[in-house]
Image (cartoon, helix red, strand yellow):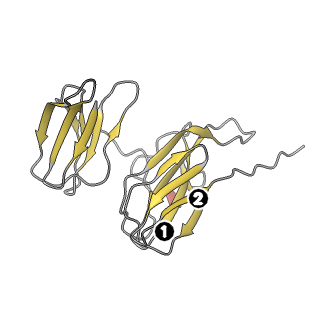
Amino acid sequence: MLYVASTSGRVTAISIKALPFSIVWQCEFGVPVFGSLSVSSPSGNVICCLVDGHVIALDPSGSIIWTEGGHLLWQYDVGEPITSSAYVDENMQLSDPSPLADRLACICGSSGSIYLLQINSNATTYGNQQVKELVDPMVQEFAHMNLLGDIFSSPVMIGGRIYVGCRDDYLHCIGVEAKVSIKK
């Protein structure tokens, strides 16, 4: 299944099992979809972010499962507008000797900035508290880099590399290395 979102607010599911491809379902939201769609691998649910601030989850048949129904786990302010979907690297786990299972998430800002965030997935929920004010935050900046061009696309992370397209006509590939010192 291929899922496509449009600036008109339509999400379309297309079956690519056989030629010719066929439309399986469409949902109209009336406001533009912001960023790339995300598909939850175990369930096949499709997550959509709309420009009016709503987050909507669709099941594989196109039915709305929830909209704005969860509670805030964490938030992180990068200090500028975010112009892409976040990409969480599910395969790269930081090999810190601590018992925490950290993941890396990549987001891009409007000025050409790439932010790599370290997320502690085993930490408890902090609700609506500002993460930067906490002593032991769930989320902290792991790395930050500025590119020469404005970022045009959502980042993709594969095997410790970040791929992102910019308006300077280049696709940039940035390598990520987790340097961990083991204390004896």
Which of the 4 quarters of the picture holds residue 92? Answer: top right
Q: Position of residue 77 (x, y in %)?
A: 44, 63
Residue 44 in view:
yes
Q: Which mark is residue 46?
A: none
* Separation (CA) of disc 1 from disc 2: 12 Å
Does residue 56 sit above or below 150 in this rendering? above
Which of the 4 quarters of the picture holds residue 149? Answer: bottom left
Q: Where is residue 51 in the image (x, y as percent from the top left)?
A: 21, 57
Q: Which residue is drawn at 45% across and 48% down?
A: 87
Label 1 sits on what residue type?
A: Ser
In screen coordinates, is 11 left or right of 153? left
Does residue 102 sit above or below 9 in this rendering? above
Q: Which residue is drawn at 45% across and 70% down?
A: 112
Front-most of 120 and 24? 24
Evaluate if marks 1 and 2 touch, with contact meaning CB atoms under 8 Å apart: no
Can you say which quadrant of the picture contains the N terminus?
top left
The secondary element bearing badge 1 is classed as strand
Q: Where is residue 168 in the image (x, y as percent from the top left)?
A: 43, 72
Q: Mark 2 points at which residue?
A: 174
Q: Position of residue 19 (x, y in %)?
A: 23, 27
In screen coordinates, is 87 left or right of 181? left
Closest to the camera, between mark 1 and mark 2, is 2
Front-most of 128 and 161? 161
Residue 69 in view:
no
The secondary element bearing badge 2 is classed as strand
Which of the 4 quarters of the picture holds residue 94? Answer: top right
Label 2 sits on what residue type?
A: Ile
Q: Which of marks 1 and 2 is nearer the N terminus?
A: 1
Around disc 2, counting alpha carbons within 10 Å, would you say few (fewer than 14), some (14 to 19), or many (20 or more)? few
Q: Name the residue under label 1.
A: 113
Front-most of 43 and 162? 162
In screen coordinates, is 17 left or right of 112? left
